[in-house]
Image (cartoon, rainbow, N blue to C red):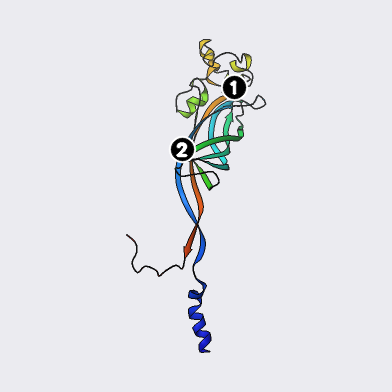
Amino acid sequence: MDDRAINKCTLGAETGPQTIIVRQIIGEKEKQKALDIHVVVPERKPAIEQIVDVFVKEVEVNSVDVITDKVIVRGEFEVKAIYVAALPDQPVHAVEIKHYKWTLDIDIPGARRGMDAEASVVVEFVDYDVEDHHRAYKYKNFEPIECDDDDDDDDHDHDDCHDHDHDHDHDDCDDHGHHHHHRNCREFDVSVILKVTAKVMTDREVTIGTGTLPTTPKG
C-alpha cells in the first residue's frame, strides 16, 4: 500500500517535460463598412405611395481569408422594404434584394497566410432616401402633400412619367407642372453600415514541466 502511494506522488516527476499546443491571438480589430444600395421596384409590382420600413436581414459572413498583415472578409445580406402602394385601396407590398454581397479588408499586423481567422458582422445603421418630388419623400419628412380632387380616379400604375419615358430625369415630372409628380415612386436608395470584427489566431507549442513554478507573478 505504501509503495503505491509513493508512486502516485512521484508520477508527475517521472514523466518529465511535456509539450502542449496553445491557441494564441495574433490580433483582433473591428471596422465599419458603408454601403449605398439603389432599389428599383419591379414593373410587376405597384409604385410606392409611402415607405413603411426598410430593414436588413440574413446578414452573414461567407469567408475569411488571411494574407500578409490583412484579413479579407466576404459576406452577404438581404434588403427588404415594406411600402404602401400608390393605388386607390392602398395595399401593402414589399420589395427585396437578396444575396447582396459585400467585401471588407481589415488590417491586422502580424497576420500571415495559413493562420486561422474568424469574423462576425452586425448591422449598425439602416436608412433610406427618396427623391424629394415623390410622395414617399413627403411622408418621410412630414411635409404637406398637395392632392388633386381627381387623384383617386387616376390609374396610379400608368400615370407615371417614369413609365412613359424611362430616359427622362426624375425632375421632368416637376418641369411639366403635372400634379402627379408627387406620386408613383419606383426607386429609392438604402444606406447600410455594417460593423465587422475579425480575429487572427495561430497555434504555438509550449513546453511545461521544465522547472518549478514561480512563487510570484511576473511584472
Residue placed farthest to the left in the image? 219
Gap in angstroms between the C-alphas marked 2 and 1: 45 Å
Quarter holding the C terminus is bottom left
Helix, strand or loop at label 2? It is strand
Q: Quadrant of residue 31?
A: top left
Residue placed farthest to the top in the image? 176
- For image coordinates 39% across by 69% down, the residue present is 213
Relative to 72, does residue 118 appear above or below in the rendering? below
Residue placed farthest to the right in the image? 44
* 143 left or right of 90 in image: left
- Front residue of 117/145: it is 117
Relative to 28, does residue 133 appear above or below in the rendering? above
Q: Residues within 10 Å of mark 2 (few under 14, many from 20)?
A: some
Residue 71 coordinates in the image, percent (x, y): 51, 41
* 116 left or right of 214 in image: right
* 156 left or right of 19 in image: right
Find disc 2 in the rendering and name its residue. 32
Helix, strand or loop at label 1? It is helix
- For image coordinates 54% across by 26% down, the residue present is 188
Residue 203 coordinates in the image, percent (x, y): 52, 54
Amino acid type of disc 1?
Answer: Asp
- Tell me the tag on residue 139: none
Q: Residues within 10 Å of mark 1 (few under 14, many from 20)?
A: few
Find disc 1 in the rendering and name its residue. 152
Amino acid type of disc 2?
Answer: Gln
Residue 115 coordinates in the image, percent (x, y): 53, 47
- Front residue of 85/70: it is 70
The label nearer to you, 2 versus 1, is 2
- For image coordinates 57% across by 30% down, the residue present is 84
